[in-house]
Amino acid sequence: MGNRLSRIYTRTGDDGTTGLGDGSRVRKDSPRVEAYGTVDELNSALGIVLACEVDERVREVLTQVQHDLFDLGGELCIPGMETVQDADVERLEHALDAFNEDLPFLKEFILPGGGMAAAHCHLARTICRRAERVLVTLAQGEPIRPQPAHYLNRLSDLLFVIARVLARASGHGEVLWHHERRKRPQ
């Protein structure tokens, strides 16, 4: 493990820059910082899901995802580092297939909700989608391997399915969108 922080503040970021893992400094609003910051935000959102009552299978998968996201943040913070692999994406696909297997076929869109854990999982899903968009922006200006984007794309799908599982397990059920409820102008 690297150096331990004995003092949390350094004052080096007071000028609006931050240090990357390779020692270089960039503006705090750079696409790279936005990308790993959004991945960190996603990881925190998953921590809130895990603070709720969730099935042990869900807990295992999301805990592994948190570790993966920490690695992904490292990859984004250290240009040239490679942590996310095709096998990580495949692991998400296997989990997605396993969780989705017992769910009924969807005929309507689902609104975020369905109990506290499910609602938090939906929020994590939307943060994941934003992380993916930010990564696409970063890749327009810097070389980024495809695996991180593949991982985030698969993860957002997995979080959608897990939110469905959590909504059903909580007894709240899924909140379906009913387009006919919308008032139409006459």
Image (cartoon, rainbow, N blue to C red):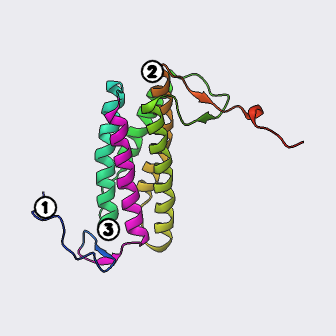
Question: Residue 122, percent across and down?
Answer: 49, 39
On screen, residue 148 versus residue 14, left or right, reads right
Q: Is residue 59 above or below residue 169?
A: below
Q: Amino acid at mark 2?
A: Ala
Q: Which residues are magenta?
A: 23-52
Q: Determine which of the numbered discs, if any, sits on residue 80 in the image.
A: 3
Circle 2 SS class: helix
On screen, residue 113 versus residue 169, left or right, reads right
Q: Nearer the viewer, mark 3 or mark 1?
A: 1
Q: Amino acid at mark 3?
A: Gly
Furthest toward the bottom, the residue is 15
Q: What residue is disc 2 on? A: 169
Cα distance in 3D space between marks 3 and 1: 18 Å
Q: Crowding at label 1, few (<14), some or many (≥20) Cα neighbours within 10 Å?
A: few
Q: Crowding at label 2, few (<14), some or many (≥20) Cα neighbours within 10 Å?
A: some
**Predominant SS of the magenta segment:** helix
Q: Nearer the viewer, mark 1 or mark 2?
A: 2
Give whichever of 21, 27 is nearer the camera.
27
Is tag 2's residue or tag 3's residue first in the polypeptide sequence? 3
